[in-house]
Image: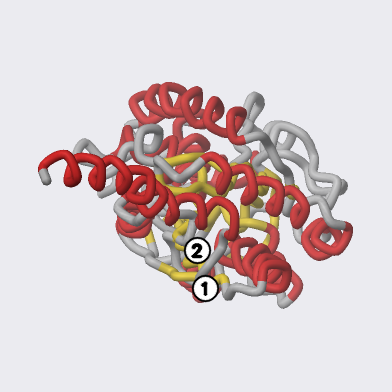
């Protein structure tokens, strides 16, 4: 009888192995098997949200599973990123991260509840997005040089709006503040749209924002666009000077955005996601949709994206220390 039980147990082992392996195999082979949640750790209406929704629409059409954008804003992106880090690593929860969430935050927040390297599996870069330097129409400046002169004449009187503490709009201004040795006051808002509305209302006097959402306010006459933050002019706005050539030599700030999954997501799922993201980003329709709005859609291998994150963390640790940037 004991021998029979031993034989029966041995016969059951392969079956049990198949049962245990089936969920992962199914996820890898048939993925996605249910709707995908794409977490955007900032408010709706900003560039990260707009790009993420465009990618989600294409994924939904291609795979037949709904991609639902979940805006989890607050705390410099930490809230949404923490939710993503704790999610099941099965490819059904994704995250759009950027230079702030994965390179700057580790230096700004001493008790960060996620590790940007350990807790995530990078999929691909999706965009780089140089920022425009916008000023309220009441500011007596039409170049970066003139703006810096105004700031020096009135130390601490000019306020700069940001979409959040620690994000690209914040760090671009901190870099300007440090390199130009000026005193301007940081006022963070809950999202890019809220910050732009405050700038239009005159609550703040300047802001680094993306061309995608800022330019319409220039056309309406509420704001003035002085320069672009990247080291070279944008093909989408070739007549717009860089900050470096318009009054602050050496200035160069180009934020990046990318798609990630929780760590331990199976390799076949990462590979499938990467192929789909590359297909979407490199399509002529997407390029046409975003090129006129100052967004440079781009892709990378998961390995290159991971290497970028690792290299950016020490770079921004030094910048945060040198500028004295804080989340206060």
57 vs 167, left or right, is right
- The residue under label 2 is 38
Q: Position of residue 205 (x, y in %)?
A: 50, 60
Q: Earlier in the sequence, mark 1 or mark 2?
A: 2
> Which of the numbered marks, if any, corresponds to residue 68?
1
- Residue at 43% x, 56% y is 23
271 vs 188, left or right, is right
* Other residues around mark 2 within 10 Å, as few (<14) / some (14–19) / many (≥20): many
73 vs 171, left or right, is left
Residue 190 seen in this snapshot:
yes
Q: Position of residue 251 (x, y in %)?
A: 62, 30
Question: Is residue 230 or residue 27 the one in the foreground?
Answer: 27
- Residue at 67% x, 68% y is 63
- The image quarter containing residue 6 is top left
Question: Is residue 174 or residue 149 the one in the foreground?
Answer: 174
Q: Would you say the residues marked 1 and 2 are in contact, meaning their CB atoms lie under 8 Å apart?
A: yes
Question: Is residue 304 or residue 169 the one in the foreground?
Answer: 304
Question: Element at badge 1?
Answer: strand
Residue 185 seen in this snapshot:
no
Residue 180 drawn above or below residue 75: above
Residue, far left: 2
Q: Position of residue 267 (x, y in %)?
A: 53, 39
* Other residues around mark 1 within 10 Å, as few (<14) / some (14–19) / many (≥20): some
Q: Marks 1 and 2, how far apart in space? A: 6 Å
1 vs 254, left or right, is left
Q: Position of residue 54 (x, y in %)?
A: 68, 67
Question: Is residue 285 or residue 145 the one in the foreground?
Answer: 285
- Residue at 36% x, 59% y is 80
- The image quarter containing residue 61 is bottom right
């Amino acid at each position: 009888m004991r021998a029979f039980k031993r034989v029966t147990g041995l016969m059951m082992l392969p079956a049990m192995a198949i049962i245990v392996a089936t969920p992962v195999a199914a996820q890898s082979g048939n993925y996605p098997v249910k709707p995908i949640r794409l977490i955007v750790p900032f408010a709706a209406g900003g560039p990260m949200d707009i790009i993420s929704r465009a990618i989600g629409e294409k994924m939904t059409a291609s795979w037949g599973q709904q991609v639902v954008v979940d805006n989890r804003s607050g705390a410099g992106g930490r809230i949404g990123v923490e939710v993503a880090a704790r999610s099941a690593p099965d490819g059904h929860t994704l995250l759009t991260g950027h230079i702030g969430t994965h390179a700057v935050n580790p230096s700004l927040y001493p008790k960060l509840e996620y590790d940007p390297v350990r807790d995530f599996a990078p999929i691909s870069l999706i965009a780089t997005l140089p920022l425009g330097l916008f000023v309220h129409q009441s500011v007596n400046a039409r170049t970066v040089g003139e703006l810096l002169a105004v700031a020096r004449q009135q130390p601490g009187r000019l306020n700069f709006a940001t979409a959040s503490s620690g994000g690209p709009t914040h760090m671009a201004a901190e870099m300007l503040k440090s390199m130009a040795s000026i005193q301007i006051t940081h006022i963070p808002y809950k999202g890019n749209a809220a910050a732009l509305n405050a700038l239009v209302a005159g609550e703040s006097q300047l802001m680094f924002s993306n061309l995608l959402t800022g330019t319409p306010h220039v056309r309406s006459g509420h704001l003035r666009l002085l320069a672009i933050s990247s080291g070279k002019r944008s093909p989408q706005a070739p007549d717009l000077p860089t900050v470096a050539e318009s009054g602050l030599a050496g200035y160069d700030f180009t934020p990046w955005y990318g798609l990630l999954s929780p760590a331990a997501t199976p390799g076949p799922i990462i590979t499938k996601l990467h192929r789909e993201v590359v297909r979407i980003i490199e399509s002529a329709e997407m390029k046409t949709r975003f090129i006129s709005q100052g967004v440079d859609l781009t892709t990378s291998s998961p390995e290159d994206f991971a290497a970028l994150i690792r290299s950016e963390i020490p770079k921004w640790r030094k910048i945060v220390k040198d500028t004295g940037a804080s989340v206060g």
